[in-house]
Structures are given as C-alpha cells and as structure tokens.
Image: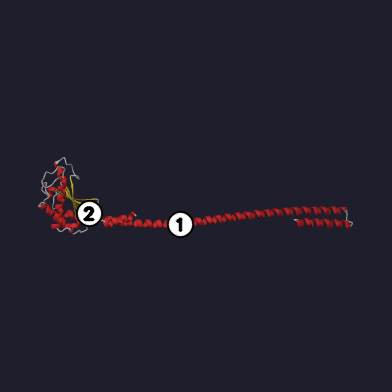
Amino acid sequence: MKNTALLLSSLYLLLGLFFLGSCVSKKKYLSSLERISRMKQDSTDFEQRIEGLDQDKNNLRQEVQASQAKAKTLSLELEGREKDIQQKELLLDRQNNLLYEKAQQLNDLQTKIDQQNQIVNNLKNTVANALVNFADDELTVNVKSGKVYLSLSENLLFPSGSSRLDKQGAEALGKLASVLNTNPNIEILIEGHTDSIPISSNIYKDNWDLSVARATSIVRLLANEYKVDGSRLTASGRAEYQPVDTNTTKEGRAKNRRTEIILSPKLEELFELIENTSQ
C-alpha cells in the first residue's frame, strides 16, 4: 500500500511538472487530473480488496487450523474407541470361551447324572428281580434321591422284640448279597426301625438298642456268611423316629417295624464334576 501511494504521489508530481513546463490547455489538464483521481480511487479499491483477501486468507487459515485440531481430536477419540472395542472383543472372547467350557462341564455333568441314574435304576431292577419270590407286604424296593431303598418287614426278618434273624429273612439277605457282591461300587447302609411302643426286655434297654441290634445282626450276616466286604457296610438304628405310617393303629405300627437297606452308588466322580462346574 505504501509503495502504491508513493507511486501515485510521484505521478502527480511528474504530471504537474509536465503541465507546467508545457503549454497544455486547461481542459486537458483537468481531464488528466480526473483520470488520476480515478486511478487513485481504483488503487484504493484495489488495496481494500487486497486487505479483504488478506483477511479472508487469515480466516481460512484459522478455519483450517481449527479443522486440523478437530480432526486430530477426532482421530485420537477414534483411536481410543478402537482400542476400547478391541479390549471388549477380547473380553467377549474370554467370556465366550468360559461359557463354552461351562456348557461342556454341564454336558459332562448331565451325562454323568444320567449314567448314575441308569446305574441306580438297573440296581433297583436287579434287586427286585432277585427278591421277586417275596410278597409285597414283606419287602419293597424303591428309588429315592439317587439311592435304592430296600425295606424289609419285621415279620420277614425277626421275631417280635428280637434281633435274631429268621431263616426266611436270612434267605432273602443271601439273595441280596449275591447282587451286592457283583456290584462292588455300592455302599450299604442298614437302618433298623421300630414302632413307638416301648420295649420290655432284659436284653434291650429301649427301641434304640433294639433297632441298632437288628441292623448289626444283618451286617454280621452279610459280612461273615455271605462275604460282603465289611468296609462297605454301615449299621445304624433309628428307633421309632422315622415312621412311615401312624403308630396309632396296629397296621401302621407293623409298617414302622422294618429294616431299610439303603444302597448308594459311589459318587466321587460325580461330586468332583459338580465341584468343578460350580467354580
């Protein structure tokens, strides 16, 4: 702008000297001044346009810088989101792997449970078939909670108020022993049960004593006579405290005077699977 103003001033000076040193008409002189004025105005307009363009350039530079800063921020955000997505994908993969492992464990567990149920049902059928010649009121065979329950009435096994086994009872236990000896992975619990009428005997102090003595008699017979492994046998007495019927009637008390032989397949492998699945 300073150069332009200097140029115009010089032009005015030269024109003035030119017109003063020559005989130029006043009309031409005024026309020249008018042209110079227009040139000056054009120069001013040009300078203003240049200033406007400079301002536009500065504005554009600022906009570019702002856009670059925003782009950099967006790039950093995108990079952070990509890392977050990658971490979440890794976590999801680990969770999916864990779910797959748990599903496999559950499948294994269900397979094992089905196998155990099959073993129990087969054992129940085998015991029932071995004792098929005995009446329903003398013994029953049922499955409860993954175990086989063989319930034998007092009339089949013992005289009233005694723990001495009858011949018929010993015969039934012999048939059962044959099944037990061919299934060595079965634990055997013998429980003696009585009715609620107190016993009057010089041998047994109470129903607890009688129930335990009856269970022990069966354990001895199975171990000593029929060679069932003693480590598999457990004797216990429940006295009158787990009745299956009322003790207020003769029929109910007869049902309560019983011995239950509870057969339990060994479940160590199943328990191990359950423990692993729960972890």
For the residues labelled 1 and 2, the Cα–Cα distance comes to 49 Å
Q: Looking at the image, can residue 132 be seen?
A: no
Q: Residues within 10 Å of mark 2 (few under 14, many from 20)?
A: some
The furthest residue to the right: 23
| 1 or 2: tag closer to the N-terminus | 1
Give x and y (percent) for residue 8.
Answer: 79, 56
* Number of numbered labels in the structure image: 2
Say above or below: 246 vs 139: above
Q: Residues within 10 Å of mark 1 (few under 14, many from 20)?
A: few
Q: Looking at the image, can residue 273 be seen?
A: yes
**Disc number at residue 181?**
none
The front one of 220 and 25 is 220
Q: Where, by quadrant of the figure, is residue 3 drawn?
A: bottom right
The furthest residue to the top: 248
Give x and y (percent) for residue 243.
Answer: 19, 44
**Image quarter in which the C terminus is found:** bottom left
Residue underneath mark 1? 87
The front one of 116 and 19 is 116
Q: How is the image coloured?
A: secondary structure
Specify whether 77 is left or right of 157: right
Residue underneath mark 2? 264
Secondary structure of the residue carrying numbered label 1: helix
Q: Residue at x 56, y 56 (%)?
A: 72
Secondary structure of the residue carrying numbered label 2: strand
**Image quarter in which the N terminus is found:** bottom right
Give x and y (percent) for residue 77.
Answer: 52, 55
Q: What kind of residue is marked 2?
A: Ser
Specify whether 56 is left or right of 174: right
Q: What kind of residue is marked 1?
A: Gln
Q: Residue at x 86, y 57 (%)?
A: 17
